[in-house]
Image (cartoon, rainbow, N blue to C red):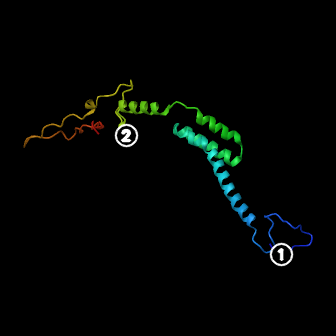
Amino acid sequence: MDEKLHPVAIEHLPFFITAPGQTDVLFNIMLVFMLAAVLVVGNLYFQLHAFPERMAHRTNVVQMEIVAVLALISLFTHNHLFWIAGLLLALVRFPDFSTPMVSIADSLEKLAGQRDGAARPVLTTGASVDPDALAPPPAPAPAAAGVAGPDPGEHPPTSAPKAPEEGH
């Protein structure tokens, strides 16, 4: 400090009082400390806020997405009820209904012959038709030379829809 003190000042000043024109060391230390404290507390807040989402990662995808949306809503609205709902939803384990349903649907498609977009014809009774029964009749053998072909008034046989090939 300066040798010359203000006449009203006491003889012994605390260490955090700086002389005019000097660097305030305590202010600089407190500035760094407060910035670090804000960053640490903010990080802890966001870690705590994301806790339900991390817990929901072991559940199915839909449940995890619902928990994530609830956590975001609670973050932006500061309504802690959404965070509590997300935490409770993350703690409860719901059964997986979609996997068995997808398996049933795949099996039914396979049984119905609708795999790869090709459908098998179905009678009105619901029974499937044998694809060989829908095949066109075999073509007649080529006519020998000098033998007349089919009657011009006769219509050629109509072709039935092709049945899907097996093995594809």
What residue type is disc 2 on? Gly
Q: Position of residue 45 (x, y in %)?
A: 66, 48
Seen as rendered, the residue at the extreme left is 145
Q: Position of residue 107 (x, y in %)?
A: 39, 31
Asked whether residue 99 is in view, the answer is yes
Q: Residue at (75%, 71%) from the top-left corner?
A: 23
Mark whose residue sits in front, 1 or 2: 1
Q: Which mark is residue 3?
A: 1
Q: Which mark is residue 117?
A: 2
Q: Residue at (63%, 51%) from the top-left corner?
A: 43
Question: In 3D space, how far apart are the residues under numbered discs 1 and 2 (Cα atoms)?
Answer: 97 Å
The one of 117 and 22 positioned closer to us in this rendering: 22
The one of 90 and 129 positioned closer to us in this rendering: 90
The one of 95 and 37 positioned closer to us in this rendering: 37
Q: Residue at (92%, 70%) from the top-left corner?
A: 8
Q: Which mark is residue 93?
A: none
What residue type is disc 1 on? Glu
